[in-house]
Image (cartoon, helix red, strand yellow):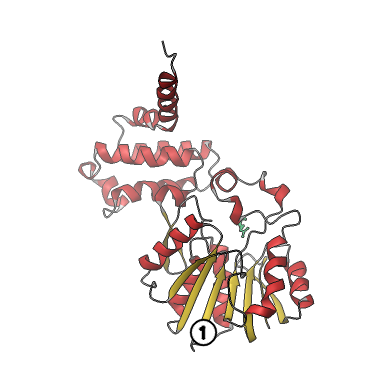
Amino acid sequence: MATGPFDRLVDAARSGFDAADHKPLLEAWQGLSLAQLRADLIERLLAAGIDEAADEARFLISHVLAPVPLAQALADPALFSWQQAEAVAALAWRRLQRVPLSQVLGSQPFWTLDLAVTPDVLTPRADTETLVEAVLAETGSGAARLVDLGTGSGAILLALLSERPAWTGLGVDLSDAALAVATGNAVRCGLANRARFLRGRWGAGLAGGSVDILVSNPPYIVSDVLAGLEPEVRDHEPALALDGGADGLDAYRDIIADLPRLLVPGGLFAFEIGHDQGEAVSALAREAGLVGVAVKPDLAGLDRVVIGRR
Ligand code: GLN
């Protein structure tokens, strides 16, 4: 029956809709209590290869119940409606396709902030708080111009501005879509008056000697390794924010080459790095004439930050 181009279009749209649809969950959950539904969801998350299934089920259900606490809804069936079950099914269905939890919920906590997250930005990771801590430990409360190269969601820039009221910040990114997310996050965090954003390739658009503190979490995954990452990262996070080239160091080479020009004398830089890149990135920094170069570990004891000064 479906023969013409219009019919084919409708069929394609319908099968796309069916694939994304959460009907299978909804049918399985018909008539279940919230406790049974939660148990079933945990089982399905585990079967889909998601390890923190109990926590994730709690996040997904709580997102729909809010502001009612999960424990209260578990105790009182009247607090969990059929419409809410449908909303949980819609979220859970996406998560079961290995869409990152942050993208399913639309936000992710980072430092003391709650940041909007879309597929256009890297989800802020707890590891990256090591970079924020390292910069805070090296700086005082005086005025400073902060630049974040490859700002993505704006996580690092906004966390630092939230801790240093006298600083102003500039977030640079190659992606317009990422800049839109970061700009929205600056407003969301009440920091828009001190945060500006600029489209550009690393520091190319910035004037020499215009930066007191430069931070970056650039793409640092070795290109060949990308395909082996978990589906959440590989299929749903932007390759632009992850792919560091053949040896993972492309972005560091570009940025470090420009640091002596960008930083004021004595200016601070800090990069997030992969756990096995401490030596290589430190060497690049020293070769560029930067001083006081040091590697800092994250909470797991893995090398995570390279810091130094001009
Ligand atoms: N830490 C991230 C990951 O392993 C990578 C971040 C980056 O390339 N800057 O997924």
Q: Position of residue 38 (x, y in %)?
A: 38, 41
From what the image shows, is residue 4 above or below residue 44?
above
Q: Is residue 159 visible?
A: yes
Please tell me in which quadrant of the rendered image residue 289 appears: bottom right
In percent of width and height, residue 64 lies at 31, 47
Nearest the eye: 132 or 251: 251
Q: Is residue 219 left or right of residue 113?
A: right
Ligand 1 quadrant?
A: bottom right
Direction top: furthest residue = 1
Viewed as shown, does residue 125 lie left or right of 117? Answer: right
Spot occupied by residue 80 in the image (x, y as percentages of width and height): 25, 42
The residue sitting at 47% across, 82% down in the picture is 167
Residue bearing mark 1: 144
Using the image, determine if residue 115 lies above or below residue 131. above
Q: Is residue 276 above or below residue 210?
A: above
What kind of element bears circle 1?
Answer: strand
Q: Residues within 10 Å of mark 1 (few under 14, many from 20)?
A: some
Residue at left offset 48%, top offset 87%: 143
Q: Is residue 308 visible?
A: no
Quarter holding the C terminus is: bottom right
